[in-house]
Amino acid sequence: MITSSFQASVAVFALVTLHVSARDTFIAAVYEHAVLRPKGTETPVSRDDALLLMNKNIDILEKAIKQAAEQGAQIIVTPEDALYGWKFTRETIFPYLEDIPDPQVDWIPCRDPQRFGHTPIQTRLSCLAKNNSIYVLANIGDKKRCNSQDSTCPPNGYYQYNTNVVYDAKGQLVARYHKYHLYSEPQFDVPEKPELVTFDTTFGRFGIFTCFDILFHDPAVALVKDFHVDTILYPTAWMNVLPLLTAIEFHSAWAMGMRVNLLAANIHHVQQNMTGSGIYAPHSPRAYHYDMETDSGRLLLSEADSRPRTSPAYPTAVDWSAYATNIKPFPVQKNTFSGFISRDAFNFTALFENAGNLTVCHKDLCCHLSYRMLRKEENEVYVLGAFTGLHGRRRREYWQVCTMLKCKTTNLTTCGQPVETALTRFDIFSLSGTFRTEYVFPEVLLTKVQLSPGKFEVLKDGRLVNKNGPSEPILTVSLFGRWYTKDSHSSSGGISNLETTNLLIATFLMIITLQIL
């Protein structure tokens, strides 16, 4: 009882101390890194060669970290795969891995580098944080020895994890997160369950996840809804996919939809469409970067609210279907046609006039659009599209999407294909949908793949509307919904529900056949 009382007193004292010294705002930094990659990943390299490459990348990150700290940043996020790149096998990634302990061990690697064995990368990252008095998030690989008698233990005797680490301004390890939703990463293992990792500072509560995690409820939504984080730290190696899933487009929309800060640091590798980092606030992007022209990295800094929920600018909660379900639908056009976005079959209807009110439906989702163009460009065609269902080839995530987008050409069969430039400006647009989910992310993407901060808003009845005058030329205006409870819950690398059913049927038929024989 005495110990419990003492721990409770310490917790209360710590909370009071944090509150008293709390800051209303902080300076955030993210660094988009042009990673130096190994020449080949088909055969394993030596540990020394792996360290050489990782230290070359850290040399670049060090300059960004020092520059950020000199400009007053309290925290910096670096990208996923920033120390060695991607496209490894389990064997070829192994020389790059270190054993990363649980942060509860109370460890400052910079002061005690040998405490957990040979950890030169963790030590250097810790020293960068300590020597520059700044929180540093880095993405590295973790290895955990397992029991070879365990059926889940890999052949090499180690679990291998895609891992984020955070060091505080004193160099102490304060957070470790193992990525749960892997995307074409055979070199890493999936943790037993999603980890919900948070840490508290004088400038807010932070949560962590990585890249593909953002498209799922756990850990991404759970950190905001259940753990009430103020800011998400988000390293990613995001390949941009037009028209709906460029990094700056979706990440800024996620921050708005979840009403939370998001510090997103992406890899810079234009040959694989990797660029797009930002500091995103609940109401609008604070800073962002998208560059497909150069091979250079980029440091972004911006002031952000420490606790956005207490800010006067904090957006009100949205009922995403309130408007769309309470109006009489606009006339459904007779010329509705099918088209594809990322393998998903949308229903489209064209915006043939300079202005109008349109409705298009797909199953139980109806999307409504009111619009007026400043001038209709003769060589540009826009459509209103709707889709609800399991997405893409893997059929795992359940999407509900309403989108107004520019077609690649005037040929309607090109609607939904990637397009990067536009001329048409809109004086008015209002997009809404009969969403069955509370998780909807509002996207507006302009010509040359740029955002539109301060030029649109979401009304509390679920309408996405423009404001502050005519828009710049538009590529897409979208409401991107995720209906998590209808996801197919097969695990990464596992088999789908359909495959399971087919397997059961095949087994049953085989048994019947054997009995007949």
Image: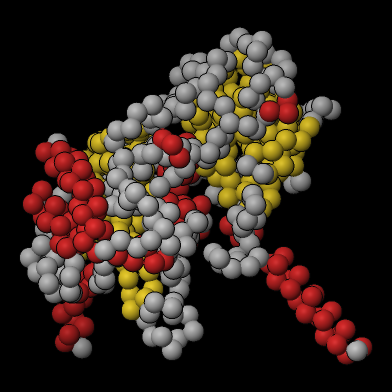
**Residue 283 occupies which quadrant of the picture?**
top left
**How is the model colour-coded?**
secondary structure
- Is there any visible trace of residue 49 in the rendered image? yes
Residue at x-position 24% and y-position 64%: 47
Q: Nearer the viewer, residue 62 or 426?
A: 62
Can you say whether 215 is above or below 2 in the image?
above
Q: Nearer the viewer, residue 351 or 270?
A: 270
Q: Residue furthest front?
A: 43
Q: Whole-percent x and y of residue 22?
A: 18, 51
366 lies left or right of 64: right
Can you say whether 475 is above or below 1 in the image?
above
Residue at x-position 51% and y-position 15%: 470
Q: Nearer the viewer, residue 161 or 460?
A: 161
Q: Whole-percent x and y of residue 301?
A: 24, 36
**Residue 139 occupies which quadrant of the picture?**
bottom left
Can you say whether 126 is above or below 189 in the image?
above
246 lies left or right of 514: left
Question: Which image quarter holds the C terminus?
Answer: bottom right
Residue at x-position 64% and y-position 16%: 380
Residue at x-position 67% and y-position 16%: 355
